[in-house]
Image (cartoon, helix red, strand yellow):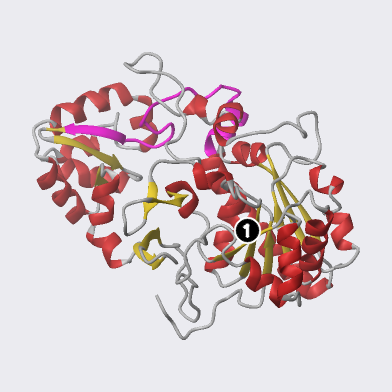
């Protein structure tokens, strides 16, 4: 996706010590925006997610590459450098790179990088303008600070699973995690936002910043309206499946030939829905005329809608609802959404070249700028692909690089 427009963050250098998902999602966001991101990986092993498959990218000869789908979705636009962080010479290389960096991003356990001489205070001493972002499961302080965490754990602990899934009185009712590692992903986005805020503040103050990002904090934040519902009522929100706690009608509905969703968000939209169903008088029924009435009388509303929608074919009904401006949609699987005309028009799926000659599929960043462009042409790197290149830019000779490799420092 070439473009002559400037990249918003082309002047920013990021040293990425993170792995798995939350940190790499943050650094990929910055890379898409044009930042130069150098990803530090363990020699011979690399980011854990490289092995998290199948599926794996396949080479032209049919053999699998060293990159899983999990790795490929969150490492676009970076340069991979292998450095042994347990090696004194490797640590010295990272400190040298940090002196030239605007941002350091890491997600090691609390205290690990301090013990390696790569903590915030240690790097800040040589680069006071450094923005240093630490991502952990529970933050740098508190009784759980040193405990490890994964997204599934945080979805459970934060309360998200308690409000996700069908209610206990329905078939299959049980707590359910979200179908993607949502806390990891949103932690990555919050981290990128915090980094950008710190960089903006640095433009005024000249000072760097330390960012303490906790996945559990993010999970609690994501409770959003459900948290506020609890705080206002002191009632613990139950799982409702696809039924919205505050706005109705909103859930999955069964048509004659399949399911659709409707997300009616106003009284005017409910009136249009009743008109589409050929029963405009229901919009004037005192039980259903207002959203509050529809929430209070939901069992009656659900029964009426189920009786109505089962008489319709989903394609024709969705077309009629779209004409009237009633929010509704098919329930696409992932193949269907990538074939959707809107998604195709927005070029959300594209490919970038792999060094071994095959194409790597990618999902486009949602950022769109009128006067700037994204940097999307560089794919996720192979392990250590740019080690010699980056070290040469630091001024190391070929002989010095060979010595580091012989010592297993890189």
Farthest bottom residue? 4
Which residue is under mark 1?
A: 192
**In the image, residue 147 lies at what x, y percent?**
73, 31
Q: In this view, does 6 lie above or below 366?
A: below
Farthest top residue? 169
Instruction: Locate residue 396: give its quadrant.
Output: bottom right
Which quarter of the rendering shows the C terminus?
A: bottom right
Is residue 247 on the magenta stretch? yes
Q: Is residue 328 left or right of residue 21?
A: left
Q: Residue at x 77, y 34 (%)?
A: 145
Q: In this view, does 204 lie to the left or right of 155?
A: right
**In the image, residue 355 lies at what x, y percent?**
45, 67
Q: Residue at x 61, y 71 (%)?
A: 35
Q: Which residue is drawn at 60% across and 60% down?
A: 384
* Disc 1 secondary structure class: helix
Along the line of sight, the residue nearer the viewer: 84 or 289: 84
Farthest right residue? 125
Which quarter of the rendering shows the N terminus?
A: bottom left
Q: In this view, does 285 lie above or below 319?
A: above
**In the image, residue 356 lies at what x, y percent?**
41, 64
**In the image, residue 4 lies at what x, y percent?**
46, 86
> Dot 1: within a 10 Å radius of its alpha carbon, few (fewer than 14), some, or many (20 or more) residues?
many
Magenta residues, as a range? 225-254
Along the line of sight, the residue nearer the viewer: 370 or 231: 370
Along the line of sight, the residue nearer the viewer: 143 or 328: 143
């Amino acid at each position: 996706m070439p473009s002559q427009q400037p990249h918003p963050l082309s002047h920013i250098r990021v040293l990425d010590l993170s792995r798995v998902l939350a940190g790499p999602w943050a650094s990929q966001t910055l890379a898409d925006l044009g930042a130069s991101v150098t990803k530090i990986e363990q020699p011979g092993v690399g980011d854990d997610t490289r092995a998290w498959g199948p599926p794996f990218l396949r080479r032209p000869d049919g053999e699998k590459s060293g990159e899983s789908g999990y790795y490929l979705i969150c490492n676009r636009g970076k340069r991979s450098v292998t450095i042994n962080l347990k090696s004194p010479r490797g640590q010295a290389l990272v400190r040298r790179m940090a002196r030239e960096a605007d941002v350091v991003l890491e997600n090691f356990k609390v205290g690990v990088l301090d013990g390696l001489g790569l903590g915030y205070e240690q790097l800040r001493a040589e680069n006071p303008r450094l923005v240093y972002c630490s991502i952990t499961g529970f933050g740098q302080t508190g009784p759980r600070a040193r405990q490890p965490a994964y997204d599934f754990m945080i979805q459970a602990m934060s309360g998200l699973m308690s409000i996700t899934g069908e209610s206990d009185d329905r078939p299959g009712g049980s707590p359910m995690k979200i179908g993607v590692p949502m806390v990891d992903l949103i932690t990555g986005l919050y981290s990128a936002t915090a980094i950008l805020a710190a960089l903006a503040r640095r433009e005024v103050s000249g000072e760097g910043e330390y960012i303490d990002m906790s996945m559990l904090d993010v999970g609690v934040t994501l409770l959003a309206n459900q948290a506020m519902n609890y705080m206002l009522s002191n009632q613990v929100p139950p799982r409702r499946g696809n039924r919205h706690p505050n706005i109705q009608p909103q859930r999955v509905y069964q048509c004659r030939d399949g399911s659709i969703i409707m997300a009616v968000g106003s009284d005017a939209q409910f009136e249009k829905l009743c008109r589409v169903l050929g029963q405009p008088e229901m919009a004037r029924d005192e039980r259903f005329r207002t959203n509050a009435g529809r929430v209070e009388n939901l069992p009656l509303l659900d029964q009426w809608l189920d009786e109505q929608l089962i008489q319709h074919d989903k394609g024709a009904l969705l077309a009629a609802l779209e004409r009237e401006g009633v929010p509704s949609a098919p329930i696409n699987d992932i193949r269907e959404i990538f074939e959707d005309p809107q998604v195709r028009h927005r070029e959300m799926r594209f490919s970038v070249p792999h060094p071994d000659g095959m194409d790597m599929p990618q999902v486009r960043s949602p950022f769109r700028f009128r006067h700037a462009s994204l940097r999307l042409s560089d794919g996720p790197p192979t392990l250590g692909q740019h080690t010699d290149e980056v070290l040469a830019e630091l001024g190391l000779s070929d002989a010095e690089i060979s010595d580091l490799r012989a010592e297993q420092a890189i």
